Image (cartoon, rainbow, N blue to C red):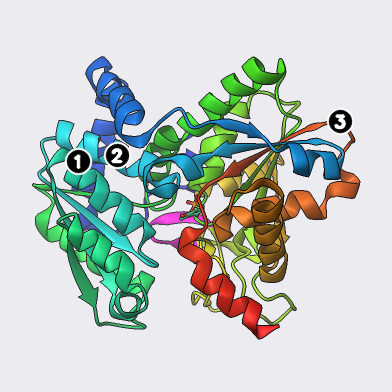
Amino acid sequence: MRKGYFGAFGGRFVPELLVPPLAELEQAVDNILPDEAFEKDMDQVCREFVGRPTPLYLCRNLSADMGFDVFLKREDLAHTGAHKINNTVGQALLARHMGKSCLLAETGAGQHGVATATAAAMLGLDCIVFMGALDVQRQSINVHRMELMGARVEPVESGTRTLKDAINAALRYWIAHQSDTHYCLGSAVGPHPFPLLVRRLQSIIGRESREQMLQQTGSLPDTVVACVGGGSNAIGIFHPFIQDTGVELVGVEAGGRGGPDDHHSSTLSRGTPGVLHGTHTFLLQSIEGQILPSHSVAPGLDYPGVGPEHAFLKDSSRARYEVIHDRQALDAFNLLSRKEGIIPALESAHAVAWVSESRDHIRPGSKVLINLSGRGDKDLDIVREQMAEV
Ligand SMILES: *Cc1c(COP(=O)(O)O)cnc(C)c1O
């Protein structure tokens, strides 16, 4: 495969001014990441700060109802309550090994901004987070969290004052400050080497899961299921199972409110190939190539692109991608809370929902592993609002 590509997807489609910092980062990914000193630091931070390994949990009540074994990889128990921290502590450590003193991030709902601010505080790095001015208003608690941990939050007043405007502002800032600043991208998206870097850092989820399944059950799972926004938690749990051809991989995208004309975030299932944020992948776009607005009840799934490796896994049929609507995700949110005493993030609830909706097609006695990417405390206001609507 060409470097930086996953089959026909991936690459580095960026303005010339972004080539030098990306080339420097590529060097660091090739040389620092595999280095023993880095691995030792990473291992220690994962154990002592993030709380790894996260448990593998057999849902006894849900399994009894379904007729097959449902396992959860408990990323909701990682520090800050989701898998995003695996990526940000890894990139923060890499930045320090590269001699950078500042972490730069963009954020939509604020989850990635909080995870970046957390990692920066722990390692004593400066942190600047660009956030659409509208999101700053809507997510004031996360702004407060970031500021508590010493990050500077920069509201972006251009465009729709949301995530894509924040990304543009962050890229402009990086061009001007590349000598001392690392851009900490939040998912397995963007130009090479980001999809590869984020996958390497999130693959710890799949490596631990694989070992825990073998240790706790004596065999590999039959099916691995994860929600797909940008695709980082999914590629993280999928990747160590890719060579295990007997293990089925299922990515679950957000179908939004449902109906053919409605807004959704089903990039792989209903999008077309194109270039967004520096990478060739599947997108939601008009016939003229304009990016279409996306929607999901889960803020972390609301993105009109997807990581290029998922485009490749879909194209090569190694993974398949399914769609779950807002309403089904909300049902699964309630189901897991009530049955198991675990309140899932609305994002993760999409993966739970696919398993629940597919129960009649899953072989009795088989083993299904779900990546529980995060906890749902952050979503209680959204859920309450949605419940009031029906
Ligand atoms: C951000 C987020 C996601 C979506 O991001 P991916 O890169 O697709 O993993 C999923 N789950 C949770 C809990 C999140 O915070």
- C-alpha gap between disc 3 and disc 1: 44 Å
Q: Residue 89: which disc?
A: 2
Q: Label 3, on which residue?
A: 365
Disc 3 to disc 2, C-alpha distance: 38 Å
Q: Main secondary structure of the magenta part?
A: strand
Tally of numbered discs: 3
Q: Nearer the viewer, residue 95 or 120?
A: 120
Q: Which residue is mark 1?
A: 122
Is residue 135 found left or right of 21 in the rendered image?
right
Q: Is residue 280 magenta?
A: yes
Q: Kindly indicate the quadrant of the structure image that contains residue 279.
A: bottom left
The residue drawn where x is 32% and y is 21% is: 34
Amino acid at the residue labelled 1: Met
Q: Is residue 168 visible?
A: no
The stretch in magenta equals: 275-281
Mark 1 surroundings: few (<14), some (14-19) or many (≥20) residues within 10 A: some
Image point (10%, 44%), residue name: 101
The answer to whether the residue labelled 2 contacts the one labelled 1, judged by CB atoms less than 8 Å apart, is yes
Label 2: how many Cα within 10 Å (few below 14, some 14–19, many 20+):
many
Q: Is residue 362 left or right of residue 211?
A: right
Q: Hey, what amino acid is under mark 2? A: Val
Residue 194 location, quadrant: top left
